[in-house]
Amino acid sequence: MADPTTTRAPTGATGVLVLASGEVIWGRGFGAEGSAVGEVCFNTAMTGYQEVMTDPSYAGQIINFTFPHIGNVGTNPEDIEATNPHALGAIVRQDVTSPSNFRATQHFRDWMAANGRIGLSGIDTRALTRLIRLKGAPNAVIAHSADGKFDIPALLAQAKAWPGLEGMDLAKDVTTLQTYSWEDGLWKLGQGYATKADKPDLCSAKRPKVVAIDYGIKRNILRNLVDTGCEVTVVPATASFDEIMAHQPDGLFLSNGPGDPAATGVYSVPVIKAWLETKKPLFGICLGHQMLALAVGAKTEKMHQGHRGANHPVKRLSDGAVEITSMNHGFAVNAETLPANARATHTSLFDGSNCGFELTDQPAFSVQYHPEASPGPQDSHYLFEKFAGMMA
């Protein structure tokens, strides 16, 4: 930590993280130059940093990676979950080395610069993680300047002025602006993503029609829906009930996304309530899980540090099985507020928070974690089959 009145970096430092609480952490900048303000969170995944950086759920956040060797396999145009990165920046322990993977097409440093994202290396990420665990996810400014000159008081003021994620609707910022159809299936080594030419059954007229509401949807969710046999249409987060029904869907999917679920729920909850009256199947993931909870009368709350990683154990209450899951959320459903017709199905083995529920009087269910993984294990892919089975 350093004196917040300092304006020049220590020798060799070209990057800085300034916390709203006053701490100043120096490092070596990489990627784009400039500054960005957001919430600092930590992610424990050992792989998949490119998928993490492009996950729209990370909008408004700066990621502190606990795994030290981030960037060592480079980047490629396939391992992305959205067209552009949504995380504001990356904090890593070791300097980013040259790519060491046959699929790499670009250095992580160059990819960050090309996408306007700031990186900091040489940071004690373990100490920063412990700070977050002790004090909660802080607001901060991440900055990179090749000449090592920073206006620390100005950056501190910017960090203090940022209002934080509570009450912030970010789904509108990351959602699609227009409706579109999705056709690609899952990726396979040497083959890429499956297309209609690879899977003739994707042309079948009998495929169940799914409308996916895009609050910040990851592409691998769409790939899993297609691979399960669904015909998928993606609509903006603000789509009305009538606009959704115009596609004559057999099922509704509620996607992941960033920000405060209560803020997004202002316009989303009425649409979900109207859908529930149709008694047709519904499946929600992450923010979609929280949206369904709000629609049935439950409450959500900001977590102290959140869950972010690809190794989170979740207990399936129906049989006691444990799924190792991928997670990315800073808000959670308050299980005590779930109504009588909502039965908890999954719980976190880290802190006991709710990780899934289903309605007992209609075909609707949701989970807090990411069964599509990318990155992460594939223990929970069966949930897509469950959804498809409901529509069948």
Image: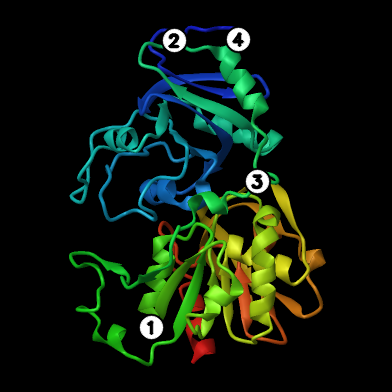
Mark 3 crowd level (few <14, some 14–19, many ≥20, 10 Å Cα)? some
Residue displayed at 28% across by 86% down: 203
User: Mark 4 or mark 3, which is nearer to you?
Assistant: 3
| Picture layout, residue 40 above or below residue 184 | above
| Picture layout, residue 247 above or below residue 154 | below
Q: Which mark is residue 3?
A: 4
Mark 4 crowd level (few <14, some 14–19, many ≥20, 10 Å Cα)? few
* Amino acid marked by disc 1: Gly
Secondary structure at badge 3 equals loop
* Amino acid marked by disc 4: Asp
Residue displayed at 69% across by 69% down: 270
The mark that comes first in sequence, 4 or 3, is 4
**Residue 215 in view (yes/no):** yes
* Amino acid marked by disc 3: Met
Residue 118 in the image, given as x and y percentages of width and height: 41, 30
Residue 38 in the image, given as x and y percentages of width and height: 57, 35
Secondary structure at badge 4 equals loop
* Amino acid marked by disc 2: Lys
